[in-house]
Amino acid sequence: MRVMLFAGLKEKAGNQVIELETDGSMKVSDLKERIYADYPSLEGEVFQVASNEAFVKDDHTLTSGDTIALIPPVSGG
Amino acid sequence: MKQFEVVETPLEPTAYHKFVLNEKQGAICTFTGHVREWTKGTQTIYLEYEAYVPMAEKMLAQIGDEISERWPGVLTSIGHRIGRLDISDIAVVIATSSPHRADSYRANEYAVERLKEIVPIWKKEIWSDGEEWIGDSRHYHSSIKENES
């Protein structure tokens, strides 16, 4: 599963994209736990998850074909 | 230009202003947000904006849809610039038009508030002695709830 990172998350992880080994699908809440476990540099970071360019909630199921991104608190304008 | 867009080049407010003008509209508000040098006593040298561009443009269009629902007849066009921006450069242009002026004012303020909540664009402040990504967590959780429908 391919996950895009932006802004501070990207800098902290040292990567624009991270790859997670999954069996094809995963709940958003599980994705968050995996991120924190596999990437200690992101531990405690606040972010929302987007799938296919829309925000999704914790009970949403992601599949490996989705375009997934971690969205830290925004600061446009 | 597109009605809702994220660009890397300087913003031209007139383009967005003209976009929302038609024969039904009697008022246009065009807001421009600029890079400020001083924030709470800290001097900014320049800003660096980053966006998740395809999603940001979708969210800007969603703001336009929300405005059309709240204030029928209002037309909205928004441009946000990313990359390096210097002091006083325009970071965002929001144009809202309406048959009568009250709705264009209200819709314009709504647009900038929503932009700061749901559009995946991030600002990094670069100071003489450091830099930091800015994240407005105050709005963060409320925007998730508002965005569920």
Image (tube, grey):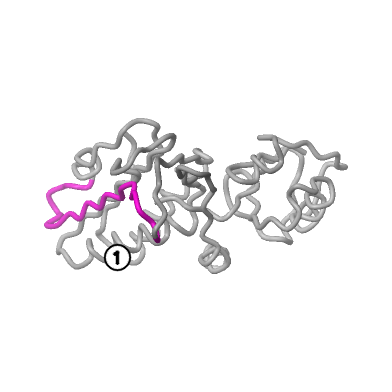
Looking at the image, is B30 positioned above or below residue B147? Answer: above
Taking the magenta stretch, the answer to whether it contains residue B119 is no
Amino acid type indicated by mark 1? Trp
Magenta-colored span: B20-40
Q: Is residue B94 left or right of residue A62?
A: left
Q: Is residue B103 left or right of residue B35?
A: left
Q: How many marks?
A: 1
- In this figure, which residue is indicated by the disc labeled 1? B71
**In the image, residue B85 lies at what x, y percent?**
37, 38
Looking at the image, is B85 positioned above or below residue B74? Answer: above
Residue placed at 69% from the left, 35% from the top?
A: A15
Residue placed at 35% from the left, 58% from the top?
A: B111
**In the image, residue A60 lies at what x, y percent?**
72, 57
Residue placed at 69% from the left, 55% from the top?
A: A45
**In the image, residue B2 lies at what x, y percent?**
34, 36
Viewer-proximal residue, A45 or B12? A45
**In the image, residue A55 lies at what x, y percent?**
60, 54
Residue placed at 73% from the left, 58% from the top?
A: A44
Q: Quadrant of residue B73?
A: bottom left
